[in-house]
Image: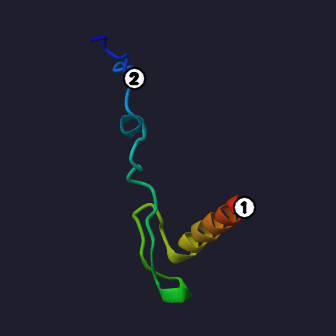
């Protein structure tokens, strides 16, 4: 039997993808109104949250 080279020295994909950092904003929306229910500590107020959300929507629209 010959052993198959499995490249065990290379990290797996799961090991190379880092989880999101703590400062990454996480939003929870209620229905179609998009009302902001929760915000992370990285977002200081509702106006800043709206700017972040609008920026993310523009980026998502550009990708689609």
In the rendered view of the protein, which quadrant contains the N terminus? top left
- Horizontal and vertical percent position of residue 11: 37, 27
Q: Which is nearer the eye, 9 or 52?
A: 9
Mark 2 falls on what kind of element? loop
Task: Read off the residue under disc 1.
Answer: 62
Quarter occupied by residue 60: bottom right
Residue drawn at (36%, 18%) of the image: 9
Quarter occupied by residue 38: bottom left
Residue drawn at (39%, 63%) of the image: 41
Q: Which is nearer the eye, 42 or 29?
A: 29
Task: Read off the residue under disc 2.
Answer: 10
- Horizontal and vertical percent position of residue 46: 52, 76
Residue drawn at (31%, 11%) of the image: 2
Residue drawn at (55%, 88%) of the image: 33
Is the residue 62 above or below the residue 16 in the image? Answer: below
Mark 1 falls on what kind of element? helix
């Amino acid at each position: 039997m010959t052993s198959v080279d499995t490249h065990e020295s290379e990290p797996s994909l799961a090991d190379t993808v880092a989880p999101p950092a703590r400062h990454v904003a996480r939003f929870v929306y209620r229905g179609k109104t998009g009302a902001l229910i929760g915000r992370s500590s990285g977002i200081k107020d509702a106006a800043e949250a709206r700017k972040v959300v609008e920026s993310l929507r523009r980026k998502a629209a550009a990708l689609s």
